[in-house]
Amino acid sequence: MAMTNTKIKLVRIAHVYYTHADLETARKFLLDFGFTITEDRGDTVFYKGYGTEPFVYCATKGAENAFGGAAFVVESVEDLERASKTLPKATEIHDIDGPGGGKRVTFYDPVDGFPFHLIHGQTPVAVSAHLPELEYNFPQSKHRAVNKTQRFKQGPAPVHKLGHFGCCVTDFAKAFEFYTTNFNLKPSDIIHDNTGKDITTFLHLDRGMEQVDHHTFFFFKGPKYHVHHSSFEVHDFDIQSLGHQWLREKKYDLVWGVGRHVLGSQIFDYWWDPSKFILEHYVDGDLVDETTPTGREEAGPDNLHVWGPPLPPTFLM
């Protein structure tokens, strides 16, 4: 089949892969973080949220802790065929060995060599939780009926879906050109330094008038490649706060939170897992579509968060 210059069309982010030297300790954290186990093979464990993805996190036991890349759903098998023939170090189309089945192509980032997965044909699962959308009483507008209370159960914050992931790249311009040329990824926001050089971007999926998350992939310039974090949506601020309390009581290490970002607007809560990877709970993020203009501004302390604890000095290192 002849390949054209048509971009590979991404539909949504689906799942991430991590390797842990201590898989059992990672398992305890991941359950406390709000995942549920959908398949346990001993040295590989698949975790899901309560949404329709068959899994959102795959944890594998290995000699060293490592990030194994994120997987994005593509529109068609033709997208997989195009990827297998045009992207750097791309594999052939092969079966996904995991819940939901489907097909996959893995390629490797041309700048820093990290794996990136494209998938198609997974079988979705039924939504496994239906959390209530609460009614709130504001000073001049009361929405909750008389004698109707707000009551909650302490415990982990159930994960809904994988929302985005991000990393530090060593050549920002090359990475930006590659991902925006080969995929329907479009910047919601671009951050530059005081010389005008672009150093950070938040990319969303260009799906026309379909409403999509403010960003599904972000990256920033740094001296050495590493994954920064993977971010998972939870239901609302109460659930997020209950999850924060649960993780604190379990004595896990807080990275930063709770607070509200400026770009993307989401309320954030970042935690170290026991392997020193950062995972985020987020709620209430912005939506964009093809009418959304690209924002551009200079990096500074005021464009990361509007409220919350002070920015940790090592957060973007």
Image (cartoon, rainbow, N blue to C red):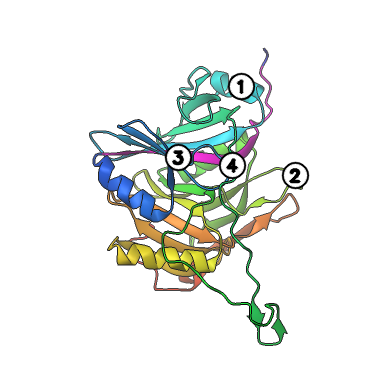
Judged left or right of residue 115, residue 137 is: right
Q: Is residue 170 visible?
A: yes
Q: Residues within 10 Å of mark 4 (few under 14, many from 20)?
A: some
Distance from Cα at disc 3 to Cα at disc 1? 22 Å
The residue singled out by tag 2 in the image is 208
Q: Earlier in the sequence, mark 2 or mark 1?
A: 1
Which residue is tagged 4? 52
Q: Look at mark 1 in the image and give the residue it sits on.
A: 82
Q: Residue placed at 76% from the left, 53% from the top?
A: 291
Q: Which residue: 67% across, 82% down? A: 146
Say what amino acid the circle numbered 2 marks: Gly
Q: Amino acid at mark 1?
A: Arg
Task: Give left or right: position of 291 versus 273.
Answer: right
Which range of residues does the magenta coloring cover? 3-20
- On-image quarter of the N terminus: top right
Q: Earlier in the sequence, mark 4 or mark 3?
A: 3
188 and 165: which one is in front? 165
Q: CA distance from mark 3 to mark 2?
A: 25 Å
Callout 3: few (<14), some (14-19), or many (20+) C-alpha neighbours within 10 Å? many
Q: Amino acid at mark 4?
A: Thr
Q: Nearer the viewer, residue 172 or 21?
A: 21
Q: Where is residue 149 shown, x and y percent of the image?
A: 59, 77
Magenta stretch: includes residue 14: yes
Is residue 155 located in the magenta-colored stretch of the structure? no
Q: In this figure, which residue is indicated by the disc labeled 3?
A: 16
Q: Quadrant of residue 44?
A: top left
Dot 4 lies on which element? loop
